[in-house]
Image (cartoon, rainbow, N blue to C red):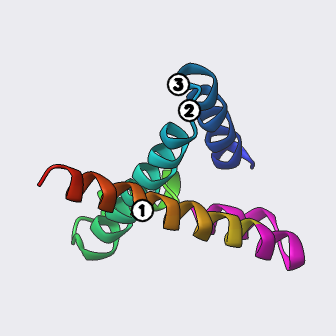
Amino acid sequence: MYIDLVVLIVLMIVVIFVFKKFDSFVYFIGSLDILLRILAFIRDNLPVPELRALLARYFPSSIPSILARYMNGIVYTIFVWVYVIIFMIFWFYITRTFFKKK
């Protein structure tokens, strides 16, 4: 079903309406994707079959894997490029914060 896509869209809308800043949205996307990738790493490298099955069933590998599940063609390509641009902005924010603290 579309539950993972619906949850992702609802969370993005909540972040946009609660924080009302673009950088909050960028931090949310970056943090969520990092969390999903950590869970995918745990799923792939942990020898506990029950936990592996639980993580494989309820948590996708990354945000692009959610997009790939429901889109294809040019629409998928456009959304992945938007995702890449958001991650470049995320990297810029992280780098700027790192150099500001020095």
Give the distance between the C-alpha atoms of the residues marked 2 and 3, in whole angstroms. Answer: 6 Å
The dot on residue 21 is: 2
- Which secondary structure lies at badge 3? helix
Q: Nearer the viewer, residue 96 or 74?
A: 96
Q: Which residue is mark 1?
A: 92
| Amino acid carrying mark 2 in the image | Lys
Amino acid beneath label 1: Phe
The mark found on residue 84 in the picture is none
Q: Say which amino acid is labelled 3.
A: Phe
Q: Earlier in the sequence, mark 2 or mark 1?
A: 2
As displayed, is residue 85 above or below residue 4?
Answer: below
- Spot occupied by residue 55 in the image (x, y as percentages of width and height): 40, 57
- Find residue 72 and report its image quarter: bottom right
Instruction: Magenta stretch: give its range.
Output: 63-78
Residue 68's x, y, as percent?
71, 70
Q: Are marks 2 and 3 in contact (CB under 8 Å)?
A: yes
The crowding category of the residue bearing disc 3, from other C-alpha atoms within 10 Å (few below 14, some 14 to 19, many at least 20), is few
Q: Residue 89: in sight, yes or no?
A: yes
- Give the structural element (helix, strand or loop) at label 2: loop
The residue under the point 33% across, 67% down is 43
Q: Is residue 47 left or right of residue 58?
A: left
Residue 62 visible in image = no
**Quadrant where the image shows the C terminus:** bottom left
Instruction: Bin the neighbour count of mark 1 within 10 Å (Cα to Cα): few under 14, some 14-19, many 20 and up.
Output: few
SS for callout 1? helix
Do the CB atoms of the residues marked 1 and 3 lie less than 8 Å apart? no
> In the image, 28: left or right of 12?
left
Residue 64 magenta-highlighted: yes
Q: Which residue is mark 3?
A: 19
Query: Which residue appears farthest toward the top when viewing the image?
Result: 18
